[in-house]
Image: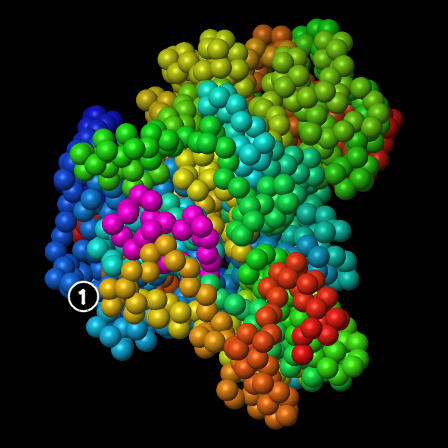
Amino acid sequence: MRNIISKIGVTLLVLSFVGILAFAINTGFKIATGLEDDNRFSVSMVTDGGGINDQSFQESSWKGMQELAKETDVKVSYVECPQTSDFLSNIDKLADENTDLIWGIGYKLADTIELAAKTNPEINYALADFSLGEKTPENVTCAVFRSEESSFVVGYIAAMTTKTDCVGFVGGIKGLVIDQFEYGYLAGVKYASKKLGKNIDVKIQYAESFTDSAKGKAIAMKMYDECDVIFHAAGGAGVGVIEAAKETGNYVIGVDKDQSSLAPKNVLTSAIKDVGKAVKMISIKALNGENTGGKTFSYGIKEHCVGIPAENPNLDPSVYKSAIEIQRKISDGKIVSPGNEKDYNEFINKLSRGEII
Amino acid sequence: MTRSISRILKSYFMRTFIAVLLGFVVASAILFITGYNPSQCMAVMFNAVFSRPKFIVNVILKSTPIILTGLSVAFAFKMGLFNIGAEGQYIVSTIAAAIAGLVFNFHPIIQVPLVIMSGVFAGAIFGGIIGFLKSKFGIHEVITSIMLNWIALYLCNYISNLACFHKPESDGTYPINESGLTLFMYKWKFSEEGRSFLKNNPVLNDIILKTDFNFNFILAVIIAIVVWVVIYKTRKGYEFRACGLNPDAAQNAGIDVNKNIIYTMLISGALSGLAGALALTGSSNPVIHVLPVFENYGFNGLSVALIAGSSPIGCIFAGVMFSALIYAGQSLQFKLGAPSEIVNIMIGTIVFFVALSVIIPMIVDKIVEKEERKSA
Amino acid sequence: MERGIALEISKDYAVQMRGISKFFGNFQALDSVDLDVKKGETHAILGENGAGKSTLMNILYGLYGADGGTIYLNGEPVYIKNPSVAISYGIGMVHQHFMLVEKFTVLQNIILGNESTDKFGIINMRKARKKVIEIIKRYGMNVDLKKKIRNISVGMQQKVEILKALYRGAEILILDEPTAVLTPQEVDELLEIIENLKKDGKTVIIITHKLKEIKKSSKECTIIRKGKFVDCVNVKDESEQSLAEKMVGHKVKLLVDKEKATPGEVVFEIKDLNVKSERGIDVIKNLSMSLRKGEIYGLAGVDGNGQKELMEALICRLYVESGKILINGKEIQNTSTRNVLDSKISIIHEDRHRYGCILGMSVADNAILEKYREKPFNANGFLNYDERDKYTEKLIEKYDVRPSKCKYTKIRNLSGGNQQKLVIGREIENDPDLLIAIQPTRGLDVGAIEYVHKVLIDLRDKGKAILLISLELDEILDLSDRIGVIYDGSIVGEFDQKEANEQNVGLLMAGGKNNDEEHI
């Protein structure tokens, strides 16, 4: 008896499950949520695994979007995707919500944004911190940053500040984006050492992670045996570098945003990369009806999207002054900072030939 | 009367259902406290799953890997082993499948099984290592599993960055060759012909073009049934269950417990491996990439197995439910701005209540007992 | 001493319990049980396994709460919420399974949980030692305080438990099955200690199902059957037979009926066996023995003298360093458990819950535990459930497993006796040449014990060899045709049933020399 009841129960359950499924696949159920009649211009962003509290560019992007919402009548929202396989379905969900502009933040989302743009040609997408280059679809806008410019400036500052004639660089995972930081920084150091007329050693090491702060700290502790300034471009792993600076009493240069709050006495300056500002600028363009599709916008010192903070309490005023001078030179195009190995070698050649002043 | 009610309440389906319900109640309370309208949240979540055919398809597609890792955990659990290493087995499987998919390029009839089997094989090896260490040296499977999870993670990061596989300007490998994909009509749906056909059929357009439509779920269901048959109908399954319930008695009855530990972990690893391989071949972005943290396919499998009470068939339902919760949770984020932490707390609460659901029969017993003594 | 009406509550009684009831779920373990224990007396509580005697005492000790009834101590009603309260009332209990910390010394164990400390929180060891030594002297206990628990014998450990209770100021001492693990000599020592306690005015309650000891130790005896109070008797007026009948509720045969054995050829032999334990200690040392068809060989010995390791070596779980194990002339040492079982050896393991059956599986699944891989149960890798059920039904009927429609119930839900019947049936159905029975009646009630003994003797009469390993000397003496004594990993003496008695076997079990014969 009991067996029969439970068998009938299970059968009913399965049948109803299949029934609901069949019905829903054809028409779909919907419950009123009270959110339906919001017809404002809407902008959404999709993050990678880092999430909007990543202390880095995801956070910065979301901040930019919040500012956008404050300044204009735009509806903003975000979705976090801890799993890569969520990228497509979440971007697709946003498209279903009649979102007017969908941002993918970071190079990890590049492929998915490209695919989504192909399947939904009627929707506008944007990609921050990565360029799809020539294959950029008509409905995708890309925003890239000339991080090598700010890195050049902090490299210059590091070289001018060091007393041990040895500075360090801790990267996250080697790749195009971090190359910009590395070679810009190297170029800045070389430029300054030529000016000072002495040789300054640069130690370079990668944490192979953007999250492992313990590893970042271990690397930095070792580096501080010889160096007294380290520039990190390692996201969460860089937090460990800053901690090491705090413990050893040395200087560290922050990245992406003004990181002086993490160690007020040790953060010399920061190589700011204001992704949020670019996100905001492109979103406003879209709001104003400008067609930005298929284009790649590059943001650097000139556009005030990269650079160093205005307040640098630990920085020698004279160094700051000359750093501002360098910023102006870059902005004017007098100095072109290299962002990859090839450009860097060229830059060194030019430097040694005295073609760069 | 009280008897029959108590029997219904004690049945596994019912008590899981009650636990899920309780989980939603507590989750609503949490939402309320944190300043979100619970009924609105529930409506948003409901819509996120049921309002469009595509959403249901997505939930099912996303449930496939966790059903399989759930099966993997449940299977090992029948043998009394706690396979926390499903995560690592999943990852090595994606690595092996990706390498096979990149290196070889045969006709799909050979390529698809080849890619999937490499993943399954890698997962089985990783599971087998755990089983071998446990049976030969008595090292607890949880310890080796955790170690192997990390090894898998870093191996994945290493392979992703190897010059021969690494796709420049990304954090991962090149996509695997198209011949290895199990996506439904992958080429056709992006072709002119396919697009124009799908345009005239909005429902199909929605569920085929806009999702990574594939039939992996059906394979997962078949595998669940096979696992059930193996456990409950075969000689080997009988051995596994005996070893799981009482290894001493099983050993004394002439069953080679140590050998069965290795077999179980091989099979369990293979199931996680299948999850990884299918997740790769069923994706429109079939790459492996640098993992900063675990993506939790294996760990979600633990939750699925827990909700299912280690029943293979239950894993199907639990997997779909879990996948729906995650999928719907992400909609909460952009619709209402609820942070992912709240969503995770909600899911955690529900899993917690299901884990607690073993006490529901006890509570029912207590109540019945009191009733009866009152009437006596 | 028949008692029509309940005794009055009086100061002369150390413990009086009135109408104690206890439920476990739907099962009523105790149904309005009364108990009256006179001050300064030894009182026995007699009952079969599962009759509720331990439950009753656990209620007195505060481990369980009663669902009804009242407890009076010295004429005053008390509420014993937990063991701490019981201890404060001067109640001490020695459980069947000792609760000692293996790695601690005797003294440390005694004062554990009741450490008297100075104002800095440091244990005052000297004071504690003084107090303990005083107690030891008063009751004539011979205990070395410095030794670690794991290095002393079980009998000694029991004394430590008693000391523990006395140290906490026990006036009423409850002993749960105190003689189950002792050699006859140790039993005598214990009885002497109990006598000393009584002289000192302490009240002792002994839980037991052994009739002999009741006769020796107690003045009064309360009998419980199936959770109900049966009688409170004056031990002097009763015979063992009458006590047993009151306990079981019907006529019983205390002595085993059996014909003289007619042993045949040798089927099983162990030659100069040497085995090391997992820790690498020599546990079996040059052990030799042989069994013939149609005889029961009883292996007597105190627990921990190599019985367990001998079994493990036999089923190939321990490696045999040297020596041979032969069945029907075939060597089986260091092969596999499967091979041993396939060589017509069947084993009824001790502790069926742990080694003999799988509690989480159904009766039917347990029935085929050793046969599942053979036809007809195994059909090309799949289990044939119809055949399994048919076979199970046959076993249930033949071996009188109750309830009779239990094939799909989990074996956990069967009573101990019925579990054992199934296990024994399963093993005998294998048609073994050698049946090894280890503690086959442990935890069974008298009725079930009778049944098991009968089955074993029937099997012997069919010409099978039976190796009986038991810690119960009475059982060995009653059943065996030949008796071997194992001590420290060797057989230190063999007796024919005729010449064996409690004294000469007991002496060898305790490690003494046998004066009559030189077997060593």
Q: Secondary structure at mark 1?
A: loop
Q: Is residue C383 above or below residue B155?
A: above
Q: Residue at x 33, y 44 (%)?
A: A118
Question: In this rendering, would C268 be left or right of A101?
Answer: right
Question: In this rendering, would C219 be left or right of B27?
Answer: right
- Residue C104 visible in the snapshot: yes
Q: Residues within 10 Å of mark 1 (few under 14, many from 20)?
A: few
Q: Residue at x 29, y 69 (%)?
A: A284
Quadrant in the picture for the N terminus of chain B: top left
Counting from the top left corner in percent of width and height, residue C116 is at: 63, 76
Q: Residue at x 27, y 52 (%)?
A: A123
Q: Is residue A281 above or below residue C515?
A: below
Q: Residue at x 54, y 56 (%)?
A: B292
Question: Is A128 in the magenta?
Answer: yes
* Front-most of residues A156 and C29: A156
Q: Residue furthest bottom?
A: A317
Question: Is A32 in the magenta?
Answer: no
Q: Chain of mark 1?
A: A
- Residue C497 visible in the snapshot: no
Residue C467 picture quarter: top right
* Front-most of residues C19 and A64: A64
Residue range in magenta is: A117-141
Counting from the top left corner in percent of width and height, residue C71 is at: 37, 61
Q: Is residue C352 above or below residue C73?
A: above
Counting from the top left corner in percent of width and height, residue B304 is at: 39, 43
- Judging by the rendered image, the residue that carries numbered circle 1 is A40
Counting from the top left corner in percent of width and height, residue A238 is at: 59, 69
Question: In this rendering, would B207 be left or right of C456?
Answer: left
Name the residue type under label 1.
Arg
Residue A312 picture quarter: bottom right
